[in-house]
Amino acid sequence: MKNNTVYKIIIRSSVLLIILFLGCKNMFLNPCENDNKIITTGTYLQANVDKEMWGDFQLVLELDKPRYLLNESIQTKLYFENIGEKTITLDGILPERNSANPPRLSIWTNNGNRFEINKLLDNLQNDNKIVINPGKSVMLMQNDLTQVGGVILHEDTSGVGYIAEELDKVYSKFEKGIYNIQAGFLPTPQIYSSITDTLTFMIE
């Protein structure tokens, strides 16, 4: 990440970002608060899915609390949970593979800053099938936002999509204020693609 290299995000990523931002609902209302934790979920993007055939699942995004002090650790988790009665099998998740996106977090602020993080767990970065039995889940991402790398996004004036400035730590561009975070996962088979609702947290 020498000299914060600037590069074009491929169209596939731009499409996911557009879906994420357009899909934002209740930007300042967290769907679920459990003690200090804040949690939101997503499931099938398609309507009327045959769950007898495909099973049932939810993509779960979790933060350890809704308010933080500047430079305080911000713990996030993203996991895929089988809540049905049928075993779900996903293809392996390789970030560079063309046929599927790795899971990613999208974060944006009221002043227009947008960030993207796709640092998944190391043990998932292979071609091994991911088998999730009923009642079980698989952890996809578990990060401290103050320590993880990613990109800050700038709109491309040519209209192609976004230009991303790569950051060793996205938190280096964070400041006090309100942040919105949402997760997306487009695995294969694509029937299991999902985007969560939005969580809001504050840095004070």
Image: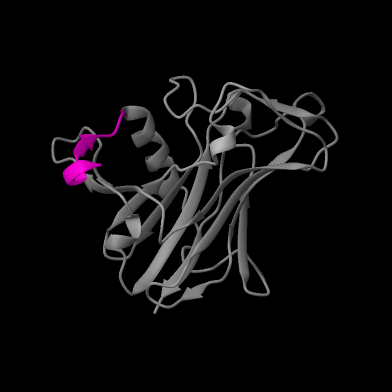
Q: Quadrant of residue 54?
A: top right
If the image is split into quadrants, where does the C terminus sit?
bottom left
State the residue in front, 165 or 156: 165
Residue occupying image coordinates x 62% and y 68%: 37
In the image, the segment drawn in magenta is 1-10
Q: Quadrant of residue 157?
A: top left
Q: Is residue 175 above or below residue 10?
A: below
Q: Is residue 99 above or below residue 75?
A: above
State the residue in front, 177 or 168: 168
Residue occupying image coordinates x 49% and y 25%: 100
Q: Does the segment drawn in magenta span residue 8?
A: yes
Q: Is residue 130 above or below residue 108?
A: above
Query: In the image, 67: left or right of 84?
Result: left
Q: Quadrant of residue 172?
A: bottom left
Residue 26 visible at all = no
Query: In the image, 160: left or right of 120?
Result: left
User: x and y percent of residue 44 in the render?
Assistant: 64, 37
Q: Does the segment drawn in magenta span residue 194?
A: no
> Going by the picture, which residue comes out furthest to the left?
158
Q: Is residue 36 above or below residue 88?
A: below
User: x and y percent of residue 90 in the render?
Assistant: 65, 26
State the residue in front, 156 or 103: 103
Query: In the image, 170: left or right of 5?
Result: right
User: x and y percent of residue 62 in the render?
Assistant: 59, 58
Residue occupying image coordinates x 32% and y 53%: 114
If the image is split into quadrants, where does the N terminus sit?
top left
Residue occupying image coordinates x 80% and y 29%: 87
